[in-house]
Image: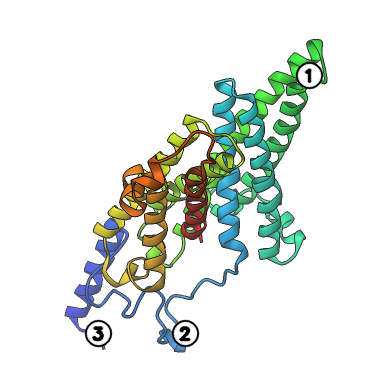
Amino acid sequence: MNTPASEQRLEQLREKAWQEGVVPGRGVDVVGGPIPRKPGYYGQPVVKPPVWTWEVPLYFFFGGIGGMSAVIAFGAVLFHQVDLARAAMWSAAVAGAVLSPILLIMDLGRPHLFLNMLRVFKHRSAMSMGAWILTAFGTCVVSGSIALELHAHEIIPGALGQLLRVAAGIFISGAAILGTLLATYTGVLIGATAIPAWFLHRTLLPIHFGTAGLGSAAAVLELLGHRIAALNSLGFYAATVELALLVWLSIDKHGAADRAIHEHGTGWQIRISVERSARARSPFLWFHSFGSALVFDRRPGQPNWVDRSRQSFRLRSRIGLRG
């Protein structure tokens, strides 16, 4: 039988949940972590663990690369870096328009299930919006890549060539907008779940996913040989933001609810991946780790293997962050 004290306590919890969205405190936190192993109501767990397989983390990773590659391509077009724009658009096409749909269909199990998601448009559903964003992004990025290649090789001269140039600009602009949504909607998707560790940080997740995708896209383009200062600056920016997010997560703790991102295997993976990303982009940290001889003692004509290693480290760290 419920006592007046317990009823009053429940009313207080309801009010706090309505105002703040989260109710920390004794009697509310799940003991043992965000996904309890002990049964709850009727022998069932209170929070069901996600049933995702390996395709979903890879979809997050390649979707981030594809989306942010389109953003880099848009910037390259604005500053007349045609070669960089072409490489970025092809990277966006392969990662965002080829690999991402394949991974999503593999996770769904059957191709027609993906087509069923396009039968309706639900602006309140992150999954429905994601399917539409991925479809529209693939259309823009493939069309933009073809138009840009035709314009770069001057296959169609005259007025049609100028029209093709305008079409390439329109498609690349659309791909950049949709690419930003593609790289960040996955953070919204997992933040809108009942998993406490994700729900508590739902505001930071889109920022984290977008920044990680930007750093990964810049790393891929640098590994392809585009060694320019702008891409290097993007890498520094991404590493700085990721490091700031890690510091914020270390300060803004919510007890047992987000224990998974601070302790045990997942906590170590997050810290190690961000630390490796920062090392890959910070000359001071490289000096601290490997000594000045490895970084600064470079003779003319020698291969820049240190810079290549930095790009490889950063790319691998992004896989760890997004997985």
First of labels 2, 3 by sequence position: 3
- Expressed as whole percent of the image width and height from the top left, the position of residue 8 reads 19, 73
Type of the residue with mark 1: Glu
First of labels 1, 3 by sequence position: 3
First of labels 2, 1 by sequence position: 2
Residue sitting at x 28%, y 53% = 248
Residue sitting at x 68%, y 55% = 117
- Taking 117 as reference, is 192 left or right? left
Which mark is nearer the camera, 2 or 3?
2
- Taking 283 as reference, is 149 left or right? right
Mark 1, secondary structure of its residue: loop
Mark 3, secondary structure of its residue: loop
Q: Quadrant of residue 261?
A: bottom left
Q: Which residue is mark 3?
A: 2
Q: Which residue is mark 2?
A: 44
Type of the residue with mark 2: Gln
For the residues labelled 2 and 3, say whether their Cβ atoms are less than 8 Å apart: no
Residue sitting at x 27%, y 56% = 19
- Expressed as whole percent of the image width and height from the top left, the position of residue 190 reads 48, 59
- Taking 268 as reference, is 90 left or right? right
Q: Which residue is mark 1?
A: 154
Rounded to the nearest angstrom, the CA distance separating label 2 from label 3 is 23 Å
On screen, 76 above or below 40?
Answer: above
Type of the residue with mark 3: Asn
Q: Is residue 203 visible?
A: no
On screen, 79 above or below 239?
Answer: above
Which mark is nearer the camera, 1 or 3?
1
Rounded to the nearest angstrom, the CA distance separating label 1 from label 3 is 80 Å
The N terminus is located in which quarter? bottom left
